[in-house]
Each structure stands twice: as C-alpha cells, then as structure tokens.
C-alpha cells in the first residue's frame, strides 16, 4: 500500500511529488508526462526567480528537477477514487492501487460534462476503452474524442465494435476504420432508461449500445463520490484538506487564480498535510 497517490500532471502534482520524495514517502504518481497548459504559455512573467520564461522552459525546469530526484510517474487516466474507510482505492486503466492518502491535482476540465453523462456513468457511459471495450464487441457504440492522444483507444474500440459513431472534437483526426462514421458535431444529451441508449443532437439522434467519453480528465464530482465541489472546483481549506479525511487537493482544481506559483505552493502544502495525516494515524 502506498502512503499517497498523486493524481494529475501539472505544476501542483510536480511540487507534491518532489516534496513526498524529499520526505521519504512511498508514493505513486499517476499523471501525464507534462502539462500541456503550462507548455503552451508564450511567456510567464510572474513566477518568482524565473522572469520572462516561456511555458516550455518552465515545464523543462520542472521535468529536469523530477528526473534528477529519480521520481517516476505513470501516464494513466484515473477514472475513479474509492473511499474504503481509512484507505483508498484508485482506478487507472485496468489497474487498481491502494493508498493511505490521495492528492488531487487534476486541473480544471476544459469541457463540461454532457447532459446525462454523469447520470449514466457505469450504465452505458464509460471513460476507459481498455476497461469496458470488450463489453461492446460487435455492438454499436459512440466515441467522443476530445484529445488526439486518445486516438489509439478509439482505434481499439473500432476493432471491437460492429459500428462506431466517432465524434472528434478537434480537426485532423487520423482514426481510420471501415466501421467508423465520423460525426463532426457535439451531442446535446445522453438519454435512456436503465442505461444509456442514445445520443441526442440538435437535428436528430443516434441509437447506441454504449458511449465512450475520452477526455484528458474526469470531473472531480464524478471521480470521487461525496467530494465537495463548488462552481466546478474542489472545496479545500488552507491545508489543502477536502471534506473527505485523507484526500487533499492542490492547483487549479481548487479554484482561481490559475497561476503556476499558486499551484506549486499548494502542491507543497498538500504533500506536507498528507504526511502529517499519516503520522497522526500511525
């Protein structure tokens, strides 16, 4: 069992990982190799000690620090966190990991959930192709593709399903499959009875057996049942503690300002708060 699991890949997660490493804790880091948001910044002028640095340069300094400390991370999308009364189970892809504390550094979701998405999660709606794809072998599915990085998962789903309605939310999708029909529009709603049964568009609908929503992050309210959120952000105190004991949050996911310095500071606080939490229960 890990002392802590960090969820996310941005500056807050980097800071949390560095501090847990220095504090000698056994932790797992589940997140992307780097922050696309940070790397895309043309110029960062308010990060102390690094005036007029580009986003790419800032990300490089983070990655270099991580590598020099020998910190490893696993690039996996976390789809669920389960509170098991004193410990936690974190699901990422086909794996499940156990830990004493969780540090959420999930950032802010770029896309809002579709109407009905959260309602039918686990009942025809899935965030994980490798976890649930086999359930729809030979069936009709819809794949909402929000990031080019998930095209390999869409191709995997096409290899299993009989018919695929593929909806890339960007230009230049390279997924090619004879059973895939590309629809360049966003559905308004997911509807059904006991399970999701169709996608509703402004000009019609498509009947499906299952729907896969492939995006870079899962909204906090879906990720962990009972987690208190407000306005799309995780509610946390000055020690980065959430309403669930043992769960901490840092970075953009806790609210504005969306600043790298704030994220790094909160990552530091969350790591120390998690260590204190573990010490109090030993």
Image (tube, helix red, strand yellow):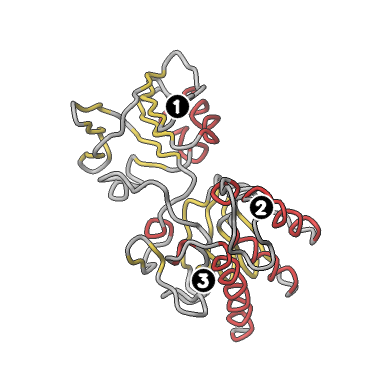
Q: Quadrant of the C terminus?
A: bottom right
> Quick one: label 3, few (<14), some, or many (20+) residues within 10 Å?
many
Question: Residue at the location (50% across, 71% down)?
Answer: 247
Question: Residue at the location (37% across, 60% down)?
Answer: 221
Question: Residue at the location (34% across, 25% down)?
Answer: 184
Q: Which mark is residue 248?
A: 3
Q: Are marks 1 and 2 in contact (CB under 8 Å)?
A: no
Q: Are marks 3 and 2 in contact (CB under 8 Å)?
A: no
Residue under pointer 1? 171
> In 3D space, how far apart are the residues under numbered discs 1 and 2 (Cα atoms)?
26 Å
Dividing the picture into quadrants, the one containing residue 192 is top left
The percent position of residue 273, horizontal first and vertical second, equals 58, 79
Residue 1 in view, yes or no: no
The percent position of residue 37, horizontal first and vertical second, equals 54, 49
Q: Which mark is residue 1?
A: none
Q: Earlier in the sequence, mark 3 or mark 2?
A: 2
> In 3D space, how far apart are the residues under numbered discs 1 and 3 (Cα atoms)?
36 Å
Dividing the picture into quadrants, the one containing residue 169 is top left
Residue under pointer 2? 59
Q: Does residue 163 appear left or right of residue 197 in this picture?
A: right
Q: Kindly state the secondary structure of the residue where label 1 is placed.
A: loop
Q: Are marks 1 and 3 in contact (CB under 8 Å)?
A: no
Q: Quadrant of the N terminus?
A: bottom right
The percent position of residue 193, horizontal first and vertical second, equals 20, 41
């Amino acid at each position: 069992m890990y002392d802590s699991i960090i969820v996310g890949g941005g500056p807050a997660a980097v800071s949390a990982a560095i501090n847990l490493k220095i504090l000698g804790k056994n932790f797992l880091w589940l997140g992307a190799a780097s922050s696309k948001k940070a790397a895309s910044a043309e110029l960062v002028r308010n990060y102390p000690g690094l005036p007029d640095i580009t986003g790419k340069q800032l990300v490089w300094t983070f990655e270099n620090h991580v590598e020099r400390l020998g910190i490893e991370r696993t690039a996996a999308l976390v789809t669920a966190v389960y509170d098991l009364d004193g410990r936690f189970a974190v699901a990422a892809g086909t794996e499940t990991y156990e830990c004493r504390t969780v540090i959420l550094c999930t950032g802010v979701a770029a896309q809002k959930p579709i109407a009905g998405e959260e309602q039918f999660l686990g009942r025809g709606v899935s965030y994980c192709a490798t976890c649930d794809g086999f359930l729809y072998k030979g069936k009709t599915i819809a794949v909402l593709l929000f990031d080019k990085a998930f095209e390999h998962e869409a191709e995997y789903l096409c290899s299993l399903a009989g018919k695929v309605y593929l909806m890339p939310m960007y230009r230049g999708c390279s997924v090619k499959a004879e059973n895939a029909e590309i629809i360049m529009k966003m559905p308004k709603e997911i509807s059904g009875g006991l399970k999701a049964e169709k996608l509703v568009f402004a000009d019609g609908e498509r009947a499906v057996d299952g729907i896969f929503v492939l995006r870079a992050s899962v909204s906090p309210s879906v990720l962990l049942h009972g987690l208190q959120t407000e306005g799309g952000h995780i509610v946390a105190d000055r020690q980065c503690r959430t309403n669930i004991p043992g769960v901490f949050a840092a970075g953009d996911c806790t609210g504005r300002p969306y600043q790298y310095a704030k994220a790094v500071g909160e990552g530091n606080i969350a790591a120390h708060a998690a260590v204190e939490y573990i010490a109090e229960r030993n």
